[in-house]
Amino acid sequence: MTFVVTENCQRCRYTDCVAVCPVDCFHGDAEMLYIDPAQCIDCGACVPECPVEAIYEEGLLPADLGSWLTINAERSRVLPVVNRKSEPLGTAEERARALGFSG
C-alpha cells in the first residue's frame, strides 16, 4: 500500500509532511504535493503532520477520493522531488479555515 495526497492539499502546500518522510517520495507543483507510490515505504509518518488532513493510507482512502491515487502516481512521475520544509502557499491559511482547520 501507499499513502495518497488528496484535494485538501490544494492551495495549501504545507510541507510538514516532507520534513518527516524518510525517503524522497513527495513531489510538488505550484499548488500541492503528491506521493510517488513507487517510492513510498508506507511508514505513515506524514499523516499526522498534515494540518489539513490531506493524506490517507491507500486502504483507508474514501471512495469519493479514489481518483487521487492515480493523480498522485501520474503527477509524481513528472514533478520535482520536494524534500525540505518550506513556507506554505499564501492562500494556505484561508484555505485551511475554509476546510474547517485552524491553518
Image (cartoon, grey):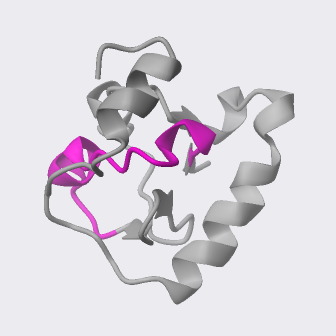
* Left or right of 39 on screen, residue 8: right
Q: Is residue 11 magenta?
A: yes
Q: How many marks?
A: 0
* Left or right of 21 on screen, residue 50: right
* Left or right of 70 on screen, residue 48: left
Query: Does 43 appear above or below 85?
Result: above
Query: Does 43 appear above or below 81?
Result: above
Residue 60 at x, y percent in the picture: 67, 27
Query: In the depicted view, which residue is nearer to us: 45 or 34?
Result: 34
Residue 83 at x, y percent in the picture: 21, 67
**Residue at left 36%, top 43%?**
91
Q: Quadrant of residue 40?
A: bottom left
**Residue at left 57%, top 50%?**
2
* Left or right of 37 on screen, residue 29: left
The quarter of the image holding the C terminus is top left
Residue 93 at x, y percent in the picture: 31, 30
**Residue at left 66%, top 41%?**
58
**Residue at left 57%, top 47%?**
4
Q: Is residue 23 magenta?
A: yes
Residue 34 at x, y percent in the picture: 50, 61
Query: Does 92 appear above or below 42?
Result: above
Q: Residue furthest bottom?
A: 78
Q: Quadrant of residue 37?
A: bottom right
> Which segment is the magenta one?
5-24
